Image (cartoon, coloured by chain):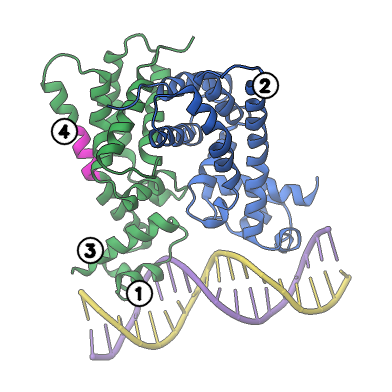
Chain colours: A green, B blue, C purple, D yellow
Amino acid sequence: MDTRTQLLDAAERLFAERGYSGTSIRAITNEAGANLAAVGYYFGSKADLAAAVARRVIEPINAAQGENLDRLLAAGGEPAVADLVEAFVGPLFDVRSARTSRLLMTILGDPAEEMRSWVGPVEAMFRDRYLAALQRALPGLAEQELWFRVRGMLAVTVVDRIEPTGDEGRRWAVTFLAAAMSAPPTR
Amino acid sequence: MDTRTQLLDAAERLFAERGYSGTSIRAITNEAGANLAAVGYYFGSKADLAAAVARRVIEPINAAQGENLDRLLAAGGEPAVADLVEAFVGPLFDVRSARTSRLLMTILGDPAEEMRSWVGPVEAMFRDRYLAALQRALPGLAEQELWFRVRGMLAVTVVDRIEPTGDEGRRWAVTFLAAAMSAPPTR
DNA sequence: GTCTATAAAAGGATAGAC
DNA sequence: GTCTATCCTTTTATAGAC
């Protein structure tokens, strides 16, 4: 297989297991069966490799979330909270192996700037589109508390890195989060 | 102040900001205004220092969670879901500065084994006591889905590291999580 | 208890042969 | 594209003076 791809695979695996700072270039090239200099040749630096890894994982999830929202809005009428939750949460379960899940955790949780450098799009997507749709679906809720809940939703889907994966996990998550998002405003 | 305490404070701050692997002993002793050899003298190694840091943060939270549960159970009758949620979530907001919150995230999320070495008690507390009480409060829910929800609760309280801190955050979190935990079983 | 000095290893990066 | 060899820096850890 492509050396470049093998480096991405190995880095994805190791970053997920040990974090950015805990993973050395030597460990990555070792795991990939490539030469120590290969990371420099293909990506320039360890930080650039990390950005490529994060990008490869996050972009398809982002795209699917966007398409799901498009579909909901195109159907006409205001989508219900549960539909919005599923549209957002679903793609995270589609791609979800234990490894991918753990990597997402690492990407969003790793304090190393190199890992978070590619998270921007997720948040932009939220702010600009899902948040607006949720606000219409939850008219009684103050914007700040809605923000709080949206972050809670992200936390559950990203961090809850244990079984089950796939369909059952998705359904449980939607139940859990739709109820949480739909709670009456505090006070 | 005590050099040992200053090392703990500095390490707590830096581990929270940069993770375990991203923080060097030099950075810690520098921040603490102590000598490079001080970590070895007081704690033996960087890993032992990390364990001490994690322990110092987690133990009081754990204790408060246990006491809250004791109090609920001593009051007689079966506690409601919202009460159980508040008993568990509350202590996480009491101690919650932005820094502490972020450190909890690092402790639970950092792939470095040294950081997670002190998480055992949290999970034990869950399994043995809160889980049983929640199961009585949610009789229709299968044990596996309950487990899923409990992990979701932990994710929200620990990861949601942004504002607000303190009372308002606690109330919002309880609203959010009580609704989520009380959702009817999936299907 | 605190400091200096240093050992010993690991890390990121790159030059240059092939 | 791939490899070896190497530079330079940073890191953990400890020995021993004060």
In space, the residues marked 4 and 3 are separated at their CA atoms by 27 Å
Image position of B121 (left or right of A47): right
Q: Chain of mark 1?
A: A
N-terminal-most mark, 1 or 4:
1
In which quarter of the view is residue D10 placed?
A: bottom right
Residue A105 lies, with reference to residue A145, above or below; the image says below
Q: Tell me the residue that label 1 is attached to.
A: A36
Which residue type carries mark 3?
A: Thr
Q: Chain of mark 2?
A: B
Label 1 crowd (10 A; few <14 / some 14-19 / many >=20) = some
In space, the residues marked 3 and 1 are separated at their CA atoms by 15 Å
Q: Tell me the residue that label 4 is attached to.
A: A67
Residue A129 lies, with reference to residue A183, above or below; the image says below
Q: Are marks 4 and 2 in contact (CB under 8 Å)?
A: no
Label 4 crowd (10 A; few <14 / some 14-19 / many >=20) = some
Q: Are marks 2 and 3 on the same chain?
A: no
Q: Are marks 4 and 3 in contact (CB under 8 Å)?
A: no
Q: Tell me the residue that label 3 is attached to.
A: A5
Q: Secondary structure at mark 4?
A: helix
Label 3 crowd (10 A; few <14 / some 14-19 / many >=20) = few
Circle number at residue B61: none
Q: Secondary structure at mark 2?
A: helix
In space, the residues marked 1 and 4 are separated at their CA atoms by 40 Å
